[in-house]
Image (cartoon, rainbow, N blue to C red):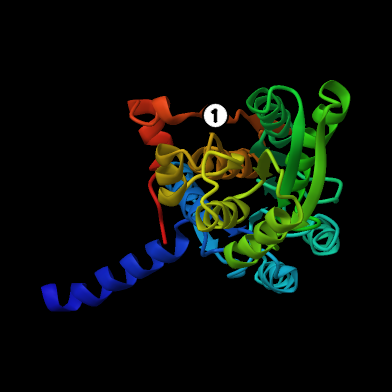
Amino acid sequence: MLRRLFPAFVLLAFFAACQRPQRPRIGVVPKATAHLFFMAIRAGVNQAAQESQLDVIWNGPSEETDHPRQIQILDSLIAQRIDGIAISATDERALAAPVARALAAGIPVVSFDSGVQAPGLSSFIATDNHGGGVIAARRIAALVHDRGEVAMLMQKPGGTSTVLREQGFEQTLRDYFPQVRIVARQYGMADAAKSRAAAENILSAHPELDAIFASSEAASLGAIQALRARALSGKVRLVTFDSSDTHVEALRDGTISLMLVQDPYRIGYEAVKALAEKLQHKMPPARLDLPVREITRPDLDKPEIQRLLKPPLVR
């Protein structure tokens, strides 16, 4: 009797499994997969996806300059009829057309970290990057006593998040600190080695330089290396964006005067939560600007700062 019933139980279990509703699948496309910043974002993505019962396809280029790869990934997700997409665009213009294709296919899209020039996005989740640039300008002006020569070591053209920081920095110096002059602007192209070479060029061309604003993780790492190589740590003041173990060490030894830090874990978490709300036919916030945290050497051992500087990472 049991032998005759067993195949029936198996078939019932099979059909029950087939009839269970599938979890929605979302694609999350970072600018790059190799940076610590995006590893922390991925940890936040995974936590929010677990809470919202979403399956995640995480896929992005290895380098932030590779927008053709991001376009390929987006088109692949569209072809897979993915339920939703969250993207940190490498270039706001280059990614506009593939994002528009996703929206036209009825796929909701959330932008995080860096925006994209496409109408119809469900939400935009990012750091208040313009505000971060304003803070950087005010702090550098104070460090040089409202008079001096400063340089900008920038990320790359077209990256919305860093462009906003750089715009906030320039506008604030121009409007409020006219005697703090920007004497050099160079891109490091989202690469630490290229950023170091750019910083070396700036330091050679401007031996009287008073300060540098490095607008990204890679730019900061290049500036740190260049200043140390020339024994200029603490002599040329350095204000940086983002963090790593190298940044923390440089803040402790005086190479960095001030670190401006984002919360990448929360960016990833909030981006997926916004997408989950859209999939549930709710109304996520159209925009969420997360604050920048200023960190100086005395702050480093505070528990809340340690949590911010050492977020969980998913590689």
The quadrant of the picture occupied by the C terminus is bottom left
Q: How many marks?
A: 1
Q: Is residue 131 left or right of residue 298?
A: right
Q: Amino acid at mark 1?
A: Arg
Does the image show residue 23?
no
Q: Is residue 169 left or right of residue 23?
A: right
Residue 118 drawn at (x, y percent): 85, 51
Q: Is residue 170 above or below residue 146?
A: below
Q: Secondary structure at mark 1?
A: strand
Task: Indicate the quadrant where residue 150 lies.
Answer: top right
**Residue at point 40% right, 67% down?**
15
Q: Which residue is mark 1?
A: 293
Nearest the eye: 127 or 251: 251
Q: Is residue 52 above or below residue 102?
A: above
Residue 160 drawn at (x, y percent): 76, 48
**Residue at point 53% right, 39% down?**
234
Nearest the eye: 148 or 119: 148
Q: Residues within 10 Å of mark 1 (few under 14, many from 20)?
A: some
Q: Is residue 89 left or right of residue 249?
A: right
Task: Indicate the quadrant where residue 2 lies.
Answer: bottom left
The quadrant of the picture occupied by the N terminus is bottom left
**Residue at point 66% right, 34% down?**
282
Q: Is residue 226 above or below residue 311?
A: below
Nearest the eye: 254 or 292: 254
Residue 97 drawn at (x, y percent): 86, 63
Residue 44 drawn at (x, y percent): 47, 45
Does the image show residue 315?
yes
Nearest the eye: 215 or 12: 215
